[in-house]
Amino acid sequence: MHILAIGGSNSANSINRQLAQFAASLFENSTVTIYDLSKIDIPLFSVQLENEIGMQPAARYFANEIDQSDLIVISLAENNGSYNAGFKNLIDWTSRLKDRKVWNDKPMLLMATSPGGRGGATVLETAVAYFPRMGADIKGSFTLPKFYENFDPIEGIIDQELLHELETVVRKIGDK
Ligand SMILES: Cc1cc2nc3c(=O)[nH]c(=O)nc-3n(C[C@H](O)[C@H](O)[C@H](O)COP(=O)(O)O)c2cc1C
């Protein structure tokens, strides 16, 4: 199984990319591509700009990465209760590719984390409700609250209850 692990943030040190990478590593017999949104070069979408300069290679590349995957493992940053602007911009561009649902009916593990106690629960709720309309086949979801208390950069999730919760979701998806 090939996994595309995405941090839904254009921050170079994205905690959501760290969580996505860790969650992807829990799947057995898998290869993983980590998608780093902080490294992509794409302007702010507008219909006028799209008419002027056309579809952006970065959006085509992202769509291709989705198409090459068997499972998407994504963790969303929450900025003011909603999607990170860099992530939303990429989604807007990708949604303009002809005849495309952004997530192309791929199975998805959908997550969020933040330093706060709600762990990005608001953006997660938004995505759980809307991503299926963009072709996501959501197989499971997970939030990690208080990232800096519950996650170690080398060990991954260190809170045993939260780790067990994520492992249970991963096992369910892996067994399908
Ligand atoms: C502009 C801005 C708005 C934010 N809004 C929220 C928020 O609504 N809820 C939340 O839990 N954290 C919020 N945060 C804190 C982020 O969760 C934190 O920066 C986290 O590291 C973002 O994930 P990332 O590292 O993957 O980008 C905000 C941060 C910024 C810079």
Image (cartoon, rainbow, N blue to C red):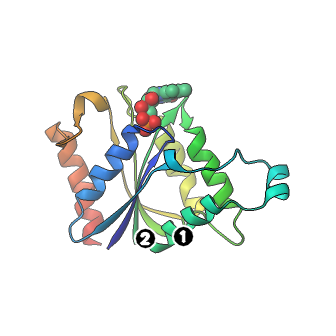
Q: In this view, does 62 lie to the left or right of 21?
A: right
Label 1: few (<14), some (14–19) or many (≥20) C-alpha neighbours in 10 Å: few
Residue 112 in sight in this render = no
Which label lies toward us, 1 or 2?
1
* Residue at 37%, 38% in the rendered image: 15
Toward which corner of the image does residue 97 lie, by quadrant?
A: bottom right
Tag shown at residue 64: 1
- Position of residue 27 relative to residue 9, above or below, is below
Return the residue found at the far left.
160
Disc 1 element: helix
The span from disc 1 to disc 2 (Cα, nearest Å) is 9 Å
Residue 11 location (% of width, % of height): 47, 37
Q: In this view, does 72 lie to the left or right of 52?
A: left
Quarter holding the N terminus? bottom left
Residue that label 2 marks: 69
Q: Is mark 2 within 8 Å of ligand 1?
A: no
- Position of residue 74 relative to residue 118, above or below, is below
Disc 2 element: loop
Residue 37 location (% of width, % of height): 50, 48
Quarter holding the C terminus? bottom left
Residue 49 location (% of width, % of height): 81, 51
- Position of residue 45 relative to residue 63, above or below, is above
Q: In this view, does 164 lie to the left or right of 128?
A: left
* Residue at 35%, 26% in the rendered image: 117
Q: What residue type is labelled 2?
A: Ser
Residue 174 in sight in this render = yes
